[in-house]
Amino acid sequence: MPWLQIKFDSSPQQVDHVSDLLTGLGAAAVTFEDAADQPLFEPDPGETRLWNNTRIIGLFDANVDMPGIIEQLKQTLGKHAPQQIQVNPLEDKDWVRAWMDTFKPIRFGQNLWICPSWHTPDQPDATNVMLDPGLAFGTGTHPTTALCMEWLDANPPVGLEVVDFGCGSGILAIAAALLGAAHVAAIDHDPQAVLATNDNAEKNNVSDKVNALLPRQFADQPADLILANILANPLLELAPRFAELLKPGGQIVLSGILAEQAEQILQRYAEWFDLQSPTQQDDWVRIDGIRR
């Protein structure tokens, strides 16, 4: 069945309204994507984050009156109407395949991979996190996640009690479990992240090791390893709590930090931790260290 795809940019404030409008005009599906390569991080409680420049994609039957739909869209949105609208024909098989082909297996370090479920792992004997892409929580392609995955590959947490703070889709928690962690507490403010992590843990056969929780559900049990890929300001606030959670000699891995924020993080955590020099990828850094 042939389709027409309509694509244009919008602000996050207009996304819900525009999505409802496209659905009302007959769209078979409405999806969102990043229009400006902006990373998304852990949302605040009750918040659903979208990109500042969000691209909206509507999928319509090829037989619709597309000029009429565009005219109704512009009239309804008024001053918020998009300046540029792309319309592209798609064959059904091309639409599905093009989306799936966007996501390839990614290797981190020597032996750790993220692999979409429709791919056969490039290295079946390696550690493969089977994870399908989703809107809110990412797929491991951002430097902050990659930095943490590379650390895990080089430092497998065999037999350790692990906390993944700000777990998102559960990438780090699942990787830690597959690499031999005894147990992983995966913490996130967003209930959708908790559901996604538990679902992904089940798909990777590590549900017995990974327990995704809201912060209020987490009992502060001593940990051997803390992974926190969030943002600099929450990391500054959480430093005393992490120091209390982590056993003496335990390891901490911090990311979601811009290079210019690294010194502030180093100074804050130096009270409790012996820290390595930051490891940088693009504009982002990872800081790891040991609890004194």
Image (tube, rainbow, N blue to C red):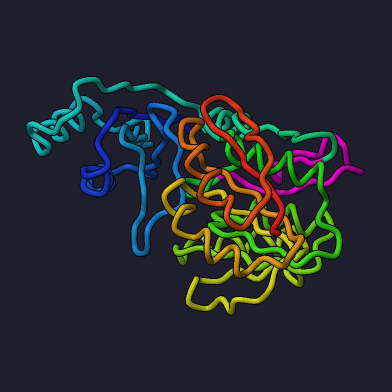
Q: Main secondary structure of the magenta part?
A: loop
Name above or below for residue 203 compared with residue 38. Answer: below
Left or right: where 92 falls relative to 249: left
Where residue 245 appears, as percent x and y from the top left, is 62, 69
Q: Residue at x 21, y 43 (%)?
A: 14
Whether the magenta-drawn stretch holds residue 52 is answered as: no
Q: Residue at x 63, y 35 (%)?
A: 278
Residue most extreme to the right: 125
Q: Which picture quadrant has residue 26?
A: top left
Residue 230 visible to an observer of this rendering:
yes
Q: Which picture quadrant has residue 282?
A: top right
Where residue 286 appears, as percent x and y from the top left, is 61, 39
Q: Residue at x 84, y 34 (%)?
A: 110
Left or right: where 109 falls relative to 136: right
Q: Which picture quadrant has residue 198?
A: bottom right
Residue 60 visible to an observer of this rendering:
no
Where residue 44 appears, as percent x and y from the top left, is 37, 58
Where residue 244 appears, as percent x and y from the top left, is 60, 69
Residues in magenta?
112-133
Q: Nearer the viewer, residue 75 or 241?
A: 241
Whether the magenta-drawn stretch holds residue 128 is answered as: yes
